[in-house]
Amino acid sequence: MVGLIIVFCLGVLNFAAHKAVLESGHPMLAQVPWFFQPLGGRLSLIVEFAMLLGAMVMAAAGSSGWAWVYALYTVLNGFSAWLIYSGRV
């Protein structure tokens, strides 16, 4: 149960970072593949949701490994969002 709550909280952080990048107006966003461009790039939020849902299902089933993988993904996602949002990339 604790793993599920942690994965959910990490998912909230991932969605916040993703939204910040989408709203940053960074020139790199113009280079995303064509299948992510509909709805202003927000179609990629569906992929983010699918990853969160999968991690939550696995955490609810008792797999702590998937929670650790999602935590690592969150760290990498947060770092890349910081690089993009701060203009370092």
Image (tube, rainbow, N blue to C red):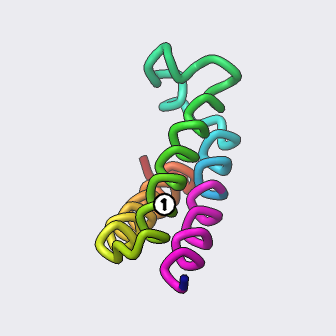
Whole-percent x and y of residue 78?
48, 62
| Label 1 crowd bin: few (<14), some (14–19), many (20+), radius 10 Å | some
Comparing 87 with 67, the one in front is 67
Q: Which residues are magenta?
A: 2-15
- The residue located at (60%, 65%) in the rendering is 13
Comparing 53 with 88, the one in front is 53
In the drawing, does residue 44 fall left or right of residue 70? right
In this view, 83 is above or below 4? above
Whole-percent x and y of residue 63?
34, 72
User: Outermost residue toward the left?
Assistant: 65
In this view, 75 is above or below 21? below
In the drawing, does residue 52 fall left or right of residue 43? left
In this view, 86 is above or below 25? below
The amino acid type found where label 1 is placed reads Val
In this view, 23 is above or below 39? below
User: Outermost residue toward the bottom?
Assistant: 2
Query: Could you tell me what secondary structure mostly forms the magenta stretch?
Result: helix
Is residue 7 located in the magenta-colored stretch of the structure?
yes
User: Outermost residue toward the front?
Assistant: 61
Residue annotated with mark 1: 57
Whole-percent x and y of residue 42?
65, 32
- The residue located at (35%, 77%) in the rendering is 64
Q: Quadrant of the N terminus?
A: bottom right
